[in-house]
Image (cartoon, rainbow, N blue to C red):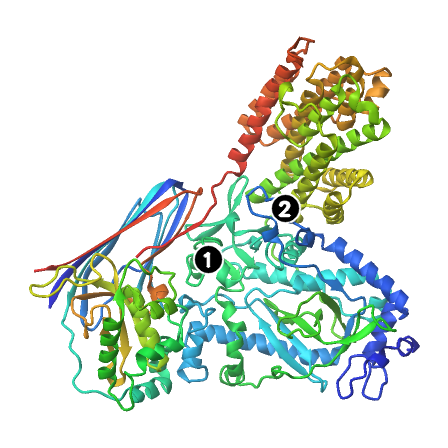
């Protein structure tokens, strides 16, 4: 098991003092079969007047906090330490149509678990253009793991990583038609494509290690939060893949949480109340392996 | 009933095999139609036309709040910089004088079906936030349910005291005479206020008809709503406070929000009036934060809380209110997430859901695409009978409170325009729905837990609006009066323009500019040919603009103004358009003055003397004091020729409505010193400066506001200074410095009021972050 430390700092500066600030943060990681959270805490400056931690419907950790005194800036810093096992693809495979039928016919707890991840959302809409990605991949009788591996490859090859192209309001159809975007976009493309053929898919929010290993190229998505996708493969359970880096299973990926799309797991969402003013946002992320 | 047979309506209802509310398939009038026609009295087309006119007038008077939507706001912006035109969203509806009558036995079928549906939808909401049995059992496909934008994922695990307190159901009759469900409303169901409003109109239009028909009363439904709201408060609040939450006058059903708030006796608040702190909800009132326990929200889920997923409208709404409701510190009625239950996509699965959750079958089928609907006679004014067959969708109102489910015995019938979808009617024409033949005992008045007396509490935003309402009313009057006085002088003696080397023209030009609140031009800047006609038009335009502002501010604080005020506001709203349209509006100016006087009278006589009234009057007095100073400075500040001074002084006295008082007191030709004495220092002249300063002093003292007391004191001290006849460079410099000395502290007072009382920086901004 390897150990990683993450520091994620979000700083807002306002042109004038704000009276109230409300923030919802999804920054605290959860345990997964491959991940053990050793420590995780959030520091807020100025000190919050209210604080409440809860679990969201997907089991993610959510922190609500509020500042009710005048403040010119707000800094939210999370410090995490997690242990990671290296993931491995399962032995064997099963036909993707079989998984689709299983998901559609699921009852009881399985239905409750995979149901939300079958649904197209506004960030992962059911677009006809998705067929261009899935048509060659989900061929009759093919194994679900092989197909998803192919899809991951396909997105990695076809789409160009371009931080200047998109932001959070860029619709999926632009990403699809222009074939460019960032990790959040590629995770959305993956989720939408999988759901369009009937496979449950999660959007996963987290981080990726920033230091390239000797002999390997520097990975894209450094110094920012990262996102990838997880597919439900029937008896094999959930299998993560990272289309931005063409990794399956992903390595050196620290999971924070998952949902149907970015909006379900946005790291920080807030509202400030105060006079009209400019505001700036600075985000920095640092991921490092601890030996 | 011979009247129905005589109406000639049957001749127009030549649609065989389609159920009609008036006549059966053999052409015989139905008993309910006989009741309707009897209630209206004569079915002569001319009599119906008269009834319709009366109904229009009464609806206008009852619901004058909607006038803000009716104004042709094509110019200008309000004081927040929001363009008027952007706020015009709805058009007022007309009420058909003919009621839609249903007998009690038939209504009971609808009523039972509505209660069943409300129970089903509530069970569905409980399930979707809790056990998700419908998904586990495959009754509702997960891929559909979880893709609905109205599915609020983060309501999972949420167990509000009651998901739905208020539910509305649209039903219509199919061509075969049986009923169909058109649509459910669970998010922020509208129509209850409209039902009460329409009934109030018909009760005045057809009092005997309503009585003889034995139509079930509906007014108690509002009391039931109040009891339900109070009873839903968190457990530890012995005297809960409730508010009605709206997004503001731009909301399409704002008329109803305002009407219901007035009817319930609750504050009508907007998002910025509320704030969540320590998990509790607070109202930003003049005296600080006041706790709120229950919110009757007229704001849809997607507008409620900017922290929630899927929120529309940037930072608007109440940040954290959903969190507060989750923790049980405040009750939202209906609960956040209720919008899910009205989704059209769920409809195909509701039958199976009813069997799974209630063990029951749905009592009424859904309307299917293209299905033919029954017709009802509707007054259109066209044809020999003035009636035509139209399709009507009824909206039923159901409340679930401490005494269980209750369906209002009546409702609104929305008349579909040709080509309208039953789901989304144009809704320009409504019918009042009467239920006759009920044997149920009249509802017994039940004592509700007391609502804490809100008397002294005023939301900051409301105080702000009232203050600006007072200022706009006064500024409108000043502009109207100045334009009228100058116009009349000019009409009576067109040669005045050349009197005293143009001194009169220059003086009244400055008087008009002052009435428009424009800064004074120095003498050298005044154009030689003062375009008086243009100046008069500009002044009338300012009056019209101020009337629009007045109506707009008033519409957001209707619950503070007496009911009668609505009528006057309606007249002023219409005057706004007429002032701009007419070339020579002297008569119109007169009638505006009468209406403004009526408004002032209502404010003085019919408004409770609390902080609300005080801020309104503060605005009036401050604006009037500034206007008196402006008129004196403008018209009399120039050392004009004696020939011009006489008509100019009369103009200033007239503009300040003090000419009659002057003549009675001095019985002489106009003398400058006497004019100034009457306008500036006579504290018995209700139009004079001294009188306004006295009122201002009372207000700031009553508000216990030291800064205000100090500023009014400064203005009063300056106002008693002597004014000598010192002239320099054609200006009466002594008068000029007097005006400056008094105006300074008054302008400072104006700024201070905004800063001290209203300046709560409420400007919620959404922040993202990666």
Q: Secondary structure at mark 2?
A: loop
Chain under numbered label 2: B
Look at discs 2 and 1 and give the one toward the viewer: 2
Q: Position of residue A8 (x, y in %)?
A: 24, 54
Q: Where's the N terminus of chain B, which quadrant?
A: bottom right
B177 sits left or right of A220 in the view: right
Q: Position of residue B495 (x, y in %)?
A: 83, 24
Q: Quadrant of residue B465?
A: top right
Image: B162 above or below B751: below
Q: Secondary structure at mark 1?
A: loop
Q: Where's the C terminus of chain B, which quadrant?
A: bottom left
Measure how far apart labels 2 and 1 are at the Cα level.
32 Å
Label 2: few (<14), some (14–19) or many (≥20) C-alpha neighbours in 10 Å: few
Q: Position of residue B627 (x, y in %)?
A: 68, 28
Label 1 belongs to which residue? B305
Picture disc at residue B75? 2
């Amino acid at each position: 098991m390897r150990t990683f430390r993450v520091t994620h700092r979000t700083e807002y500066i306002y042109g004038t003092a704000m009276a109230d600030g409300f923030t919802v943060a999804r920054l605290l990681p959860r345990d997964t079969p491959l991940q053990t959270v050793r420590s995780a805490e959030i520091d807020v400056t100025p000190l919050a007047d209210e604080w409440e931690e809860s679990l969201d419907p997907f089991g993610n950790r959510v922190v609500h906090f509020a500042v009710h005194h005048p403040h010119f800036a707000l800094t939210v810093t999370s410090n995490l330490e997690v242990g990671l096992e290296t993931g491995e693809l399962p032995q064997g495979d099963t036909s993707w149509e079989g998984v689709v039928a299983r998901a559609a016919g699921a009852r009881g707890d399985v239905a409750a678990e995979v149901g939300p991840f079958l649904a197209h959302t506004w960030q992962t809409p059911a677009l006809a253009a998705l067929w261009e990605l899935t048509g060659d991949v989900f061929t009759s009788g093919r194994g679900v793991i092989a197909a998803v591996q192919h899809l991951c490859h396909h997105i990695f090859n076809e789409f160009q990583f371009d931080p200047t192209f998109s932001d959070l309001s860029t619709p999926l159809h632009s990403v699809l038609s222009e074939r460019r975007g960032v990790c959040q976009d590629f995770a959305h493309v993956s989720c939408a494509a999988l759901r369009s053929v009937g496979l449950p898919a999660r959007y996963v929010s987290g981080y990726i290690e920033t230091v390239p290993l000797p002999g390997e190229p520097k990975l894209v998505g450094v110094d920012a939060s990262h996102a990838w996708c997880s597919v439900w493969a029937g008896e094999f359970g959930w299998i993560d893949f990272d289309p931005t880096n063409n990794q399956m299973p992903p390595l050196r990926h620290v999971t924070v949480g998952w949902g149907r799309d970015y909006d379900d797991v946005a790291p920080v969402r807030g509202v400030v109340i105060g006079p009209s003013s400019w505001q700036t946002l600075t985000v920095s992320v640092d991921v490092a392996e601890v030996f | 009933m011979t009247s129905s047979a005589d109406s000639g309506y049957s001749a127009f209802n030549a649609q065989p095999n389609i159920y009609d509310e008036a006549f059966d398939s053999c052409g015989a009038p139905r008993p309910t139609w006989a009741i309707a026609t009897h209630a209206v009295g004569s079915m002569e087309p001319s009599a119906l036309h008269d009834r319709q006119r009366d109904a229009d007038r009464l609806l206008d008077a009852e619901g004058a709040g909607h006038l803000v939507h009716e104004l042709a706001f094509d110019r200008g912006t309000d004081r927040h910089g929001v363009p008027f035109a952007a706020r015009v969203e709805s058009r007022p509806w007309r009420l058909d004088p003919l009621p839609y009558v249903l007998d009690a036995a038939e209504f009971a079928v609808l009523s039972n079906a509505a209660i069943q549906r409300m129970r089903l939808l509530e069970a569905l909401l409980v399930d979707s936030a809790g056990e998700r049995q419908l998904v586990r059992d495959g009754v509702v496909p997960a891929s559909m349910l979880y893709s609905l934008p109205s599915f609020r994922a983060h309501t999972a695990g949420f167990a509000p005291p009651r998901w739905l307190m208020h539910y509305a159901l649209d039903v219509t009759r199919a061509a075969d005479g049986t009923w169909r469900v058109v649509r459910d409303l669970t998010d922020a169901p509208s129509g209850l206020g409209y039902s009460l409003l329409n009934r109030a109109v018909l009760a005045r239009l057809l009092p005997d008809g309503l009585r003889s028909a034995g139509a079930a009363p509906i007014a108690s439904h509002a009391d039931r709503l109040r009891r339900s709201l109070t009873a839903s408060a968190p457990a530890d609040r012995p005297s809960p406070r409730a508010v009605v939450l709206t997004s503001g006058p731009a909301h399409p059903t704002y008329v109803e929000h305002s009407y219901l708030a007035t009817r319930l006796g609750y504050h009508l608040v907007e998002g910025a009036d509320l704030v969540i702190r320590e998990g509790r909800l607070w109202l930003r009132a003049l005296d600080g934060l006041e706790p709120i326990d229950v919110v009757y929200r007229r704001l849809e889920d997607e507008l409620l809380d900017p922290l929630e997923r899927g929120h529309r409208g940037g930072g608007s709404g109440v940040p954290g209110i959903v969190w507060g409701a989750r923790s049980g510190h405040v009750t939202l009625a209906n609960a956040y997430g209720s919008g899910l239950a009205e989704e059209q996509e769920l409809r195909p699965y509701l039958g199976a859901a009813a069997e799974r959750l209630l063990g029951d079958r749905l009592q009424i089928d859904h309307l299917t695409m293209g299905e033919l609907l029954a017709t009802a006679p509707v007054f259109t004014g066209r044809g020999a009978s003035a009636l035509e067959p139209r399709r009507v969708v009824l909206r039923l109102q159901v409340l679930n409170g401490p005494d269980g489910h209750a369906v209002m015995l009546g409702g609104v019938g929305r008349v579909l325009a040709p080509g309208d979808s039953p789901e989304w009617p144009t809704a320009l024409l409504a019918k009042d729905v009467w239920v006759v033949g009920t044997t149920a005992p009249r509802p017994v008045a039940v004592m509700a837990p007391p609502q804490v007396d809100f008397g002294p509490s005023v939301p900051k935003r409301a105080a702000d609006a009232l203050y600006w309402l007072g200022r706009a009313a006064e500024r409108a009057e000043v502009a109207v009066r100045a334009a009228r006085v100058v116009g009349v002088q000019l009409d009576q003696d067109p040669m005045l323009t050349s009197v005293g080397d143009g001194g009169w023209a220059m003086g009244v030009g400055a008087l008009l500019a002052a009435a428009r609140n424009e800064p004074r031009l120095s003498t050298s800047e005044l154009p030689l040919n003062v375009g008086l006609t243009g100046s008069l038009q500009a002044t009338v335009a300012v009056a019209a603009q101020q009337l629009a502002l007045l109506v707009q501010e008033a519409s957001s604080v209707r619950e503070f103004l007496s009911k009668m005020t609505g009528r006057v506001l309606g007249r002023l709203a219409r005057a706004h358009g007429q002032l701009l349209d007419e070339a020579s509006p002297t008569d119109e100016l007169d009638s505006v003055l009468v209406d403004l006087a009526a408004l002032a009278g209502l404010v003085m006589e019919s408004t409770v003397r609390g902080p609300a009234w005080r801020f309104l009057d503060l605005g009036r007095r401050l604006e009037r004091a500034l206007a008196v100073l402006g008129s004196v400075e403008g018209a009399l500040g120039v050392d004009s020729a004696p020939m011009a001074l006489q008509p100019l002084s009369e103009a200033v006295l007239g503009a300040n409505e003090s000419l009659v008082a002057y003549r009675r007191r001095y019985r002489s030709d106009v003398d400058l010193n006497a004019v100034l004495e009457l306008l500036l220092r006579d504290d018995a002249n209700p139009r004079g400066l001294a009188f306004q300063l006295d009122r201002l002093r009372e207000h700031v003292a009553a508000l216990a506001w030291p800064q205000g007391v100090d500023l009014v004191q400064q203005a009063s001290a300056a106002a008693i200074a002597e004014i000598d006849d010192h002239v320099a460079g054609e200006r009466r410099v002594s008068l000029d410095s007097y005006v400056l000395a008094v105006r300074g502290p008054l302008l400072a007072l104006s700024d201070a009021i905004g800063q001290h009382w209203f300046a709560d920086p409420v400007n919620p901004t959404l922040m993202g972050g990666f």
